[in-house]
Image: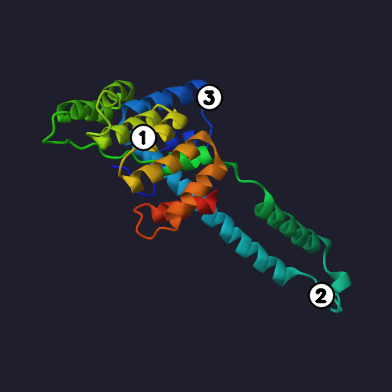
Amino acid sequence: MIEDNYIPPEIATYLAGGLSPEAEQAFEQKMAQDPALEAEVKKWLKVYVIGLEETREAWKHELNARYTQTAPDPSSKIFSFKPWYAWAASAAAVILLLVIYFWPDKSLAPAELYAAYYEPLPARELKGQTEANMLNQAHQLYNQKQFSEALALYQQIPADSIPEAVLFAGLAYLELEQPGEARNLLGEVIGFDQEKSWYVALAWLQEGKKEEARTQLESIAATPSHYRQQQAKEILEKL
């Protein structure tokens, strides 16, 4: 059993971008066939993204404190005798502080935030309607990650009879990495307001549209009753 604080070397290398293109492709194919591995990778990606932000804030505080303590006092009698390497260290601290403040953080790209925060919506069995059998067949394919086949069935179900079919058709497009199609369908869903607003935001992230995602996430973050309010706030801090 893997301990909670131990990241497997293969996952660490993958997240660090250290695999060759062939090894990276093979690892991603392995993830597609192993839901447990995929969940583990997403867990560590989220830990990395959140931890990186916390580390950067800690360094800002630490360097501010160190520079305040080591900054020279021109009125001091020992000012001119302070070893040159002490001034060099202070200068280096200032440079590093500026780098931390202003250097863009590529690890917080929208697509990576999408990977860290995306979680599939559970597809549950529906009973009591004529189209339920087709929906359940589509759900079964969706849960088996056969998204193209599931999408074909969802699209055969009348939208006005089972709006859930439109919702999951949009989510299938998201899984197929077609965020534009996903947004179009999610916009047509009747009901499911919180679910569709969240996944539209994720679709913008998947497409790399930072400002559009920000607008959608700000709306979610401003809604106390939204089931993804906290996650929206976290992503906004990292965009």
Badge 3 amino acid: Ser
Nearer the camera: disc 3 or disc 1: 1
Q: Earlier in the sequence, mark 3 or mark 1?
A: 3
Badge 1 amino acid: Glu
> Would you name the residue on which mark 3 appears?
20
Answer with the quarter of the image where residue 71 lies.
bottom right
Residue at 19%, 25% (x, y): give it: 134
Q: Residue furthest left?
A: 128
> Would you name the residue on which mark 1 appears?
38
Residue 109 shows up from this direction: no
Q: Earlier in the sequence, mark 3 or mark 2?
A: 3
Q: State the mark number for residue 73.
A: 2
Question: Where does the image place residue 54, in percent across and percent down from the top left?
Answer: 52, 56
Q: Is residue 22 above or below residue 45?
A: above
Question: Where does the image place residue 179, in percent across and percent down from the top left?
Answer: 45, 32
Q: Earlier in the sequence, mark 2 or mark 1?
A: 1
Q: Is residue 80 above or below residue 238?
A: below
Nearer the camera: disc 2 or disc 1: 1
What crowding class fits label 3: few (fewer than 14 Cα within 10 Å), some (14-19), or many (20 or more)? few
* Relative horizontal placement of residue 29, taking residue 1 as reference (left or right): right
Badge 1 element? helix
Q: Is residue 110 above or below residue 229?
A: above
Q: State the mark number for residue 90.
A: none
